[in-house]
Image (cartoon, rainbow, N blue to C red):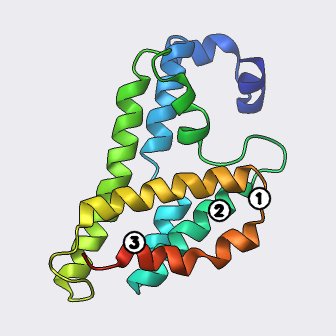
């Protein structure tokens, strides 16, 4: 708490006046992070007009994000920290579930739009492929955090994108 209040330039009573206690502060941090529309992989996915390139951009951004922080924890706060407190901190499980399903809904919505545009077949299983894409992302993040060869990981992204986008 001392590091946090020092970095914010406030004292502990001010922090507690706003959040009440450490538990509420932690939950507020999860809510803020999960609600951030600036999630690098999702921004990369949304920014690319071509769906295959969008899937590749999503996974590439996930790898890059997992390697960004040289001084501290690498990767996503939700998967790196929040997931480890499920079952131990009240209110976390529900928030983690919402973060996961929210990301999957975001990805699925794009796949549905691509179906409407004729870029994906009408029987493309949007929800299931969004879940697969999210799950692949988590594996890539773990590999990147383990400092496995990121260039080799990135070299395989087009193949992985093709797997995700493969018609049923």
In the rendered image, the vertical position of residue 33 relative to residue 27, given as above or below: below
Q: Nearer the viewer, residue 164 or 130?
A: 164
Q: Residue at x 21, y 80 (%)?
A: 115
In the rendered image, the vertical position of residue 74 relative to residue 117, given as above or below: above
Residue closest to the far front: 168
Q: Residue at x 42, y 74 (%)?
A: 163
Contact between labelled residues 2 and 3, with CB atoms less than 8 Å apart: no
**Lateral position of residue 70 relative to residue 62, left or right:** right
- Secondary element type, mark 3: helix
Q: Nearer the viewer, residue 82 or 132?
A: 132
Position of residue 129 measured from the top left corner of the image (x, y, whole percent): 33, 64
Q: Earlier in the sequence, mark 3 or mark 1?
A: 1
Q: Residue at x 65, y 58 (%)?
A: 65
In the rendered image, the vertical position of residue 146 relative to residue 160, given as above or below: above
Q: Residue at x 61, y 16 (%)?
A: 14
- The circle on residue 45 is none
Q: Whole-Å distance between the Cαs marked 3 and 2?
A: 17 Å
* Quadrant of the rendering where the C terminus is positioned: bottom left
Q: Earlier in the sequence, mark 1 or mark 2?
A: 2
Contact between labelled residues 1 and 3, with CB atoms less than 8 Å apart: no
Labels 3, 2: front one: 3
Labels 1, 2: front one: 1
| Residue 48 is at least partly visible in this image | no
Residue position marked by numbered label 1 in the rendering: 148
Residue position marked by numbered label 2 in the rendering: 63
* Quadrant of the rendering where the N terminus is positioned: top right
Residue position marked by numbered label 3 in the rendering: 164
- Secondary element type, mark 1: loop
Position of residue 118 measured from the top left corner of the image (x, y, whole percent): 20, 89
Q: How many marks?
A: 3
Position of residue 49 measured from the top left corner of the image (x, y, whole percent): 40, 85
């Amino acid at each position: 708490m001392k590091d946090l209040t020092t970095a914010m330039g406030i004292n502990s009573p001010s922090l507690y006046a706003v959040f009440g206690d450490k538990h509420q502060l932690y939950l507020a941090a999860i809510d803020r992070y999960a609600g951030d529309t600036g999630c690098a992989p999702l921004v990369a996915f949304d920014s690319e007009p071509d769906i295959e390139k969008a899937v590749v951009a999503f996974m590439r951004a996930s790898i890059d994000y997992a390697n960004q922080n040289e001084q501290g924890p690498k990767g996503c706060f939700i998967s790196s920290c929040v997931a480890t407190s499920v079952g131990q901190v009240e209110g976390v499980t529900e928030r983690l579930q919402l973060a996961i399903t929210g990301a999957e809904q975001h990805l699925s919505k794009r796949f549905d739009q691509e179906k409407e545009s004729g870029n994906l077949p009408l029987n493309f299983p949007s929800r299931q492929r969004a879940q697969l894409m999210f799950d692949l992302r988590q594996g890539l993040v773990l590999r990147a955090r383990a400092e496995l060869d990121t260039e080799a990981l990135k070299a395989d992204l087009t193949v992985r994108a093709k797997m995700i986008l493969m018609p049923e």
